[in-house]
């Protein structure tokens, strides 16, 4: 999974200038050509990343081919033909063009991101989450502790449909707010989960770079229509263009495309509001009063402002045509963005979604690989019990004997804390040494910790184990491994289904010309 996220990152960057005359075909996927320039662009971005484990050209080529096979599969499935996909690409292309039209050396990334956020607001999700933040420098023990807590809370929620999710958030979550999000406003992992949910749904525990989450969708709201979204993107792009295109830059465009005004005819238009005559020429093409009238009908403003915008728009159209036909870096950027979208979507479908839905597969994978998840030292699987009455301890041991482990803490609290009277405090989990002072003293024979003053009797119920007994106990690392397993099997199928031809002679010339 890491590899495809890396490819998304590097291909969403913008292409360096490549000379079309020097381009040759490096390889073919099912007879579809892939140019040397495209491969070099990806490789240069890969080697400019922060990774210290860079591969040489020949080592990188199989990774590149794997991604190209996934993209080929996405096209076979028609993912590049959906209206949603085409609108995304159009929004990207317009934002990219705006970057050039603003006379900058690189496209305006912030505009592109803002435009996509507007587009992706088709659905708005009001959510609340039980969230445990995991710092980047956290230890394995801290990671597993958060994992165990979230897993335990999820089990309690699933076993008690009447449980108040908000109370769990208030008690356990590092983020206690409810908030509204749309697609592309959160990370890929978060988006993947919420986009498949309905109002009232509670997600399974899942991991993001920020931490571990259980999300509940409180409401789903309709956003803008496709037409409204597209108009908003266009307006944002045009506004950015108009703000960035100062008189010096406009004059450069006028010089480039040989802007030749017919001033008498322009004066006639501005005086009477109408003319059929030629107003100006650009790149040898005449722009008439009829052309202006068509433009003005959808741009209601003062006449002088309309005419100025008409000139600006006509210049922009000329530059756009030049970008699309004469600037290979623009074409390559759009193609790489399309590939990144397809790669993300097909991988989500074939790996992420399948792993999330395949509980039987997860269980089977865990059973086959159980030894892999054994710990280097035994851990304690059970509960820590603090009570006001010593007799409660022996009674608690009896009542949990025949109950599933996931239910122990909830059942003990419900059984002994009747009528709002707190007789016990319970902490449940799988504890390594140093995770819990009471477990250290009572199980691992270290110095015993003093019981809380309000609950003077402390005991543990459970046993030492060498590894997890149920796949749910290690759901996050297991899910990651299972996704890798699914991706490996998927890649084997793709390599059998699609023919790959490599031009070894061209490969030798990569970065050497």
Image (tube, rainbow, N blue to C red):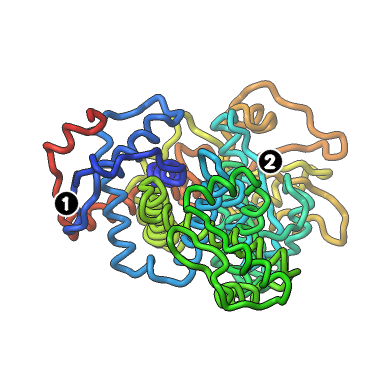
Which of these two is toward me, 286 or 503?
286
- Name the mark nearer the viewer: 2 or 1: 1
- The answer to which image quadrant residue 234 occupies is bottom right
Which label number is shown at residue 115?
none
- The answer to which image quadrant residue 236 occupies is bottom right
Kindly indicate whether the residue at mark 1 contacts the one at mark 2 (C-beta within 8 angstroms): no
What residue is disc 1 on?
Answer: 500
**Residue in view at x 62 percent, y 38 percent:** 134
In the displayed structure image, the side of residue 56 where residue 116 appears, left or right:
right
**Residue in view at x 71 percent, y 64 percent:** 305
Earlier-in-chain disc, 2 versus 1: 2
Q: In this view, does 279 lie above or below 330?
A: below
Which of these two is toward me, 282 or 49?
282
Percent x, y for residue 74? 33, 62
In the displayed structure image, the side of residue 279 where residue 179 appears, left or right:
right
SS for callout 2: strand
Which of these two is toward me, 224 or 181?
224
- The answer to which image quadrant residue 429 occupies is top right
In the displayed structure image, the side of residue 224 where residue 356 appears, left or right:
left
| Crowd around label 2: few <14 · some 14–19 · many ≥20 (10 Å) | many
Percent x, y for residue 511? 26, 30
**Residue in view at x 66 percent, y 65 percent:** 307
Percent x, y for residue 215? 64, 58
**Residue in view at x 21 percent, y 57 percent:** 32
What residue is disc 2 on?
Answer: 384
Residue 363 visible in the current orientation: no
Which of these two is toward me, 388 or 474?
474
Residue 497 visible in the current orientation: yes
Percent x, y for residue 135? 62, 34
| Crowd around label 1: few <14 · some 14–19 · many ≥20 (10 Å) | some
Residue at the far top: name it.
447
Q: Is residue 21 above or below residue 222?
A: above
């Amino acid at each position: 999974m890491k590899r495809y996220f890396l490819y998304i990152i590097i291909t969403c960057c913008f292409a360096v200038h490549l000379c079309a005359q020097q381009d040759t075909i490096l390889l073919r996927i099912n007879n579809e050509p892939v140019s040397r320039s495209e491969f070099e662009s990806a490789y240069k971005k890969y080697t400019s990343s922060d990774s210290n484990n860079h591969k040489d050209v020949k080592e990188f080529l199989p990774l590149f081919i794997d991604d190209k096979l996934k993209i080929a599969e996405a096209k076979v499935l028609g993912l590049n033909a959906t209206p949603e996909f085409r609108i995304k690409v159009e929004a990207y292309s317009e934002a990219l063009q705006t970057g050039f039209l603003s006379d900058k050396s690189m496209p305006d990334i912030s505009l592109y991101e803002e435009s996509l956020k507007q587009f992706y607001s088709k659905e708005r999700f009001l959510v609340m989450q039980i969230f445990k933040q995991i710092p980047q420098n956290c230890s394995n023990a801290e990671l597993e502790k958060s994992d165990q807590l979230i897993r335990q809370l999820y089990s309690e929620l699933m076993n008690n449909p009447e449980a108040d999710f908000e109370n769990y958030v208030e008690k356990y979550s590092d983020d206690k707010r409810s908030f509204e999000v749309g697609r592309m406003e959160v990370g890929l992992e978060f988006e993947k989960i919420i986009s498949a949910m309905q109002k009232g749904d509670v997600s399974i525990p899942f991991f993001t770079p920020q931490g571990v989450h259980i999300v509940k969708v409180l409401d789903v709201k309709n956003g803008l229509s496709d037409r409204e979204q597209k108009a908003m993107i266009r307006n944002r792009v045009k506004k950015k263009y108009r703000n960035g295109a100062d008189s010096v830059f406009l004059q450069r465009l006028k010089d480039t495309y040989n802007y030749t005004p017919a001033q008498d005819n322009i004066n006639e238009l501005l005086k009477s509001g109408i003319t059929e005559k030629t107003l100006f020429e650009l790149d040898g093409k005449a722009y008439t009063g009829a052309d202006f009238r068509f433009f003005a009908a959808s741009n209601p403003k003062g006449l002088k402002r309309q005419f100025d915008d008409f000139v600006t728009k006509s210049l922009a159209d000329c530059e756009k045509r030049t970008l699309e036909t004469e600037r290979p870096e623009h074409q390559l950027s759009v193609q790489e963005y399309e590939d990144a979208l397809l790669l993300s979507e097909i991988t989500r479908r074939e790996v992420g979604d399948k792993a999330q839905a395949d509980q039987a597969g997860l269980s089977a994978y865990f059973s086959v690989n159980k030894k892999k998840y054994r710990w280097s030292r035994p851990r304690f699987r059970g509960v820590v019990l603090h009570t006001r009455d010593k007799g409660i301890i022996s009674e608690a041991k009896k009542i949990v004997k025949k109950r599933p482990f996931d239910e122990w803490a909830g059942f003990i609290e419900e059984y002994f804390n009747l009528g709002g009277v707190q007789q016990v405090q319970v902490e449940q989990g799988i504890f390594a040494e140093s995770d819990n002072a009471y477990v250290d003293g009572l199980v691992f024979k270290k110095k015993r910790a003093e019981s809380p003053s309000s609950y003077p009797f402390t005991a543990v119920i459970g046993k030492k184990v060498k590894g997890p007994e149920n796949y749910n106990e290690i759901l996050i690392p297991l899910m990651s491994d299972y996704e890798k397993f699914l991706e490996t099997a998927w890649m084997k199928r793709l390599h059998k289904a699609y023919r790959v031809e490599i031009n070894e002679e061209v490969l030798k010339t990569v970065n050497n010309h």
